[in-house]
Amino acid sequence: MTGASTRAGGVVGGAVAVAAVDLGATSGRVMVGHVGRDALRLRQLARFPNGPVALPDGLHWDAQALYRAALSGLRDAHAWEPGIASVGIDSWAVDYALLRGGRTLGEPFHYRDARCDAGVEAVHARVGFPSLYARNGLQFLPFNTAYQLAAEDPAVLGLADRMLLVPDLLAYWMTGRQVAERTNASTTGLLDVAAREWDLSLVEALGLPAGLLADLVSPGDRIGPLLPSVAEATGLETITPVTAVGSHDTASAVLATPMRETGGAYISCGTWGLVGVETEAPVLTDAAREANFTNEGGVDGRTRFLHNVMGLWLLSETIRTWERAGESVNLERLLAEAAAVGGDVAVFDANDDVFMAPGDMPARVSSWLAERALPVPSSKAEMARCIIESLAVAFADAVAEASRLSGQAVDTIHLTGGGSLNELLCQRTADRSGLPVVAGPVEATALGNVLVQARSLGATGESIESLRDLVARTQNVRTHEPQGGTR
């Protein structure tokens, strides 16, 4: 691919060129997508690390470092493709910055910070969880934004006149406009699950200032053109818009999941495993609440009915623990050795909160198993296999529950994201569920980001189905058929 294009439309061979800033919990990327009715190509122009920063008051994100890296990445993107016609930003959910007069009041807290427990108690003292679920449709997670806000220092919260989730914060810094994109806003616990508008009476009941909440926008809406300083820093033209996408990374990933069949379930697998089905309306039954399933906003008003599973965090934090002890770990070799482990392997509950915090993951897994008189892994390969098997069980169980609770039959599982590269995980999920697992695309989140931008520029079909068909026609996937039984 050459960089030849026209600046005005960013057109290359009939495709529009757009840039995706894709921020994950461990790294961020800037990608350029060329998208047309028969074209969907991505190129990574920048990758940068991300992770928690321990400060005296707790765990935070370094949002300013992410912003600098995003601008640098956009400069690299512009150098490679001068015709970029739009920029879109997605990230993880729930975390936010507080602002006053446009200035941030400190770095955003990290969702793994221990302060969240106090926020849960404060919220449930005002509004019980069953009532919350009926209004916001969210599963109980102690780090949902409503709980984090309840845990804020009252003096700091009293100063704030705006709350912006992470992608909205970066969009504000780029455009000067403060907005809240709906798919990510749906993870705060403050959005009415049916109307997809801020639930101001709930905000009042929780004792939060309503002025914190920015005007809502939807995927495809134009947030605004770049500020002159941003255009200068990136080389992009000032007329280049920042376009709202499914700014919750899972919303973008689900959009780009090639579910062309009616019985498709999805697993967006990275640090977390988001497991569920897409529905036209939220599922707010007592059974859904008791199973801790969530109803999050999707692109075009659809609902992501899903359950959060701990995901590859379990394996990555295990590897980090070994590396902190001075041991070198080759992931490819480790997974090959894990696949060769014979005999029965004990499994643990991948949803147990004991595995949430950073720290010695192998010790916690071993303790969990030992407390229940289950075999404890005696080697790195056995530990990795134990984690993979536990994730496969959790994924299979969540798919079955999503089907039962939604009333939607499932005959295929689509596993996207970084986890789709883990062939052992994909195969064991197929074996444990008894369903074929279609692995890929790896870059589902970035693909969903660029697809929404391209659609807003008129370069693709309008329907979600047409976008998924484009993904299916242009991206590499592989199918893992179940291999008889769970072993």
Image (cartoon, rainbow, N blue to C red):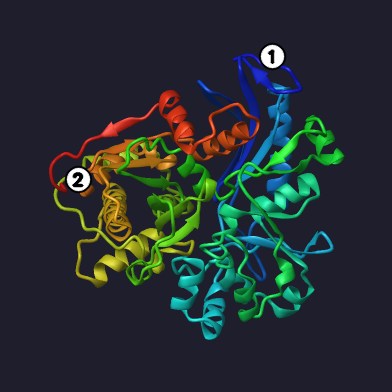
x 68%, y 28%: residue: 77
Which of these two is toward me, 359 or 467? 467
Q: Which residue is mark 2?
A: 434
x 43%, y 62%: residue: 294
**Is residue 289 toward the left or the right of residue 95 in the image?**
left
| Mark 2 element type | loop
**Among numbered discs 2 and 1, the one appearing first in the sequence:** 1
| Mark 1 element type | loop
Which of these two is toward me, 470 or 329? 470
The tag on residue 4 is 1
Residue 40 appears in the rendering: yes
Name the spot of residue 272 as percent of width and height, x first.
Answer: 44, 53
- Vertical relation: 266 (above or below) 133: above
Name the spot of residue 267 as percent of width and height, x first.
Answer: 38, 47
x 26%, y 72%: residue: 371
Residue found at the far right of this picture: 228
x 43%, y 50%: residue: 316
Name the spot of residue 354 as percent of width and height, x first.
Answer: 40, 68
- CA distance for labels 2 and 1: 48 Å
